Image (tube, helix red, strand yellow):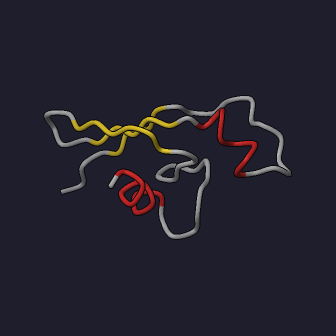
Amino acid sequence: MSVILGARLGGEDGPGLETGKFIAPQGLAVDSKGDIYVGEVSYVEFPRMFPDRPIPWRMRSLQKLRRVM
């Protein structure tokens, strides 16, 4: 289930570093406001996903998605 949800949250263009995209989502949490937090193992998976790119100096491991409704 988390893989399917991660793919939907990340969009249809595959993995990425942009807001709303993910490299390797691993965990989900929802707070009392309905905001979703996605934890990633981006440092470990980046070289495998992007073998021709150097690892960015800064990379997130947690991303917050706010409820829009």
Q: Quadrant of the N terminus?
A: bottom left
Q: Residue at x 46, y 52 (%)?
A: 20
Whether residue 61 is situated above or below residue 24 in the rendered picture? above
Quadrant in which residue 37 is drawn: top left
Q: Residue at x 70, y 51 (%)?
A: 49
Number of on-image labels = 0
User: Horizontal and vertical percent for residue 4?
Assistant: 39, 60
The residue most toward the front is 1
User: Horizontal and vertical percent for residue 65?
Assistant: 35, 45
Position of residue 36 in the picture relative to residue 26 (left or right) = left
User: Horizontal and vertical percent for residue 5?
Assistant: 36, 57
Which residue occupies the foreground of this view, 1 or 14?
1
Q: Quadrant of the C terminus?
A: bottom left
Position of residue 16 in the picture relative to residue 69 (left or right) = right
Q: Residue at x 58, y 63 (%)?
A: 14
Which residue occupies the foreground of this view, 41 or 17?
41
Position of residue 33 in the picture relative to residue 41 (left or right) = left
Whether residue 41 is situated above or below residue 17 in the rendered picture? above
Quadrant in which residue 27 is drawn: top left
